[in-house]
Amino acid sequence: MKTSALVRRKFLVELVIIGIIALAHESIIVRTNAAARLVRLPLARGITQQAGQYGQPTVTYSTQIQIGTPPKNFLVQFDLDLQEHFVPHYSWNPFNRNLHYGTGFQCKVSSSCKKDDRSVSVDYQNCQLTGKKYEDFVSLFALPDGYQANTAPVNQTNNVQTSKLIKWRQNFLAVSSASDGRFSQLPIDGFLGLAPTPQSATGLKSILVSLHEQKQIDNLQISMWFNPVLDSPNGGELILGGVDPARYQGQIYWHHLSTTNYNRWSLGLQTVTLGNQYVSCLAGSNCQVRFSSALSDIYGPPEDVKKIHTLLNTSPQSNGLQLIDCRRMAQLPTLSFMIDGIPYAMLPSNYIRKTVDGVIFKKETCYVAILPNNEMSSNSEWILGNNFLGAYYSIYDVTYRQIGFAALR
């Protein structure tokens, strides 16, 4: 009897301790709690031919937001590799075309806008952006409560009556100047950052933190599902505040973020292999891999990427793209990234993409979506874009600073 009483007492003490820890950590993660408050956003996929750095197609996954009072519509893309949030500032100048300035934000026409007159500059994808900080109401068109991922299609909708409207105050940048026009051809107006930091370098609060503080979500988690049907305009789903068990199967494999790159979703990378051929990350090279949901392709150290192109026997083009016969895709090897002893494999259908040339007489060609990053500061870092993320269900946990991957359902 004494032993049984001691066991019960010990159990009760452990429960009390767990309760104290949960209260101390307000944003404790409940990974599988379907009742947790979260925001589900439908993503629309768009493909813009020849808009990439090497003249390759650019794939965007966007959703509609509204800013201001009265609300103004913007089409934005969320990026894991960005701390800032920006949309273009309105400009009447027809020669100012580097962003969609003609449909930009104007503080003076919003009754709820607060501005900061200090000019700030940020670098994004090697493009210099200059603008000012504003604070205003931001609204998201989320999928409604009771939405079932395994039965309902993912649709981009602008209808407030059929969507759940999420509204909160948020600071952001309105960009009045961009150093080049790399974003001008894209069907999106701006980008919202989802980096694992509570605040950006310019003082913008994380959207995830803002939603959590204003009790719109319970957990500081992000999860992404990209529709594997590449020809569908329904691009997938972004969840702020939790996960969707209906989108993945099996175990989630968790990896703690690298301590050398605090502001990014960055992990240690052990090896990169193509089939049974080693191509990157020598012992002791301190390889890193980071993730971007706004890049269409994979970028790596130039010499390592060259090895892959040689092994695939590609045909180099004058613009830097490496073409490959589309009919060879079934015979090509898998590309694997080893993280914490777990190989994350990409099939040829993930790392080979099609490009369409011509308007009337269209011609389809295939290129290897593994490109050299000649502007990269480190020769041991890889950047995995949405062609890698589309191969897995991915979860980004801000509280515990870790990333999880699971197989698609």
Image (spheres, helix red, strand yellow):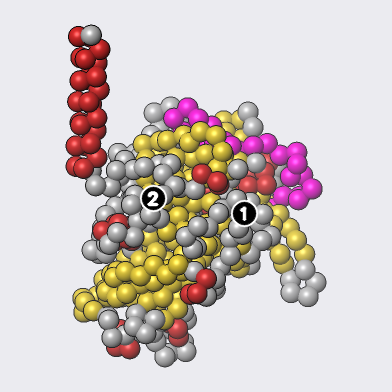
Left or right: where does residue 343 sit relative to residue 265? right
Residue 119 percent across, percent down from the top left: 24, 75
Say if the magenta span includes residue 332.
yes
Q: Residue at x 48, y 45 (%)?
A: 394
Element under disc 1: loop
Q: Amino acid at mark 2?
A: Ala
Q: CA distance from mark 1 to mark 2?
A: 20 Å
Which residue has dot 1 on it? Answer: 151
Looking at the rendering, the stretch of residues picked out in magenta corresponds to 323-345
Say if the magenta span includes residue 404.
no
- Residue 36's label in the rendered image is 2
- Residue 388's label in the rendered image is none
Pick the quarter of the image with the C terminus. Answer: top right
Q: Is residue 57 above or below residue 21?
A: below
* Dot placed on the residue nearer the N-terminal end, 1 or 2: 2
User: 217 or 334, which lies in front?
Assistant: 217
Q: Is residue 136 above or below residue 351?
A: below
Q: Amino acid at mark 1?
A: Thr
Q: Residue at x 34, y 83 (%)?
A: 69
Pick the quarter of the image with the N terminus. Answer: top left
**Mark 1 packing: few (<14 Cα in 10 Å), some, or many (20+)?**
few
Residue lying farthest to the front in this orientation:
1
The quadrant where residue 81 appears: bottom left
Residue 6 percent across, percent down from the top left: 20, 14
Query: Does residue 38 appear in the picture of this structure?
Result: yes
Left or right: where does residue 127 sit relative to residue 213? right
User: 331 or 317, which lies in front?
Assistant: 331
The quadrant where residue 250 appears: top right
Query: Does residue 322 appear in the picture of this structure?
Result: no
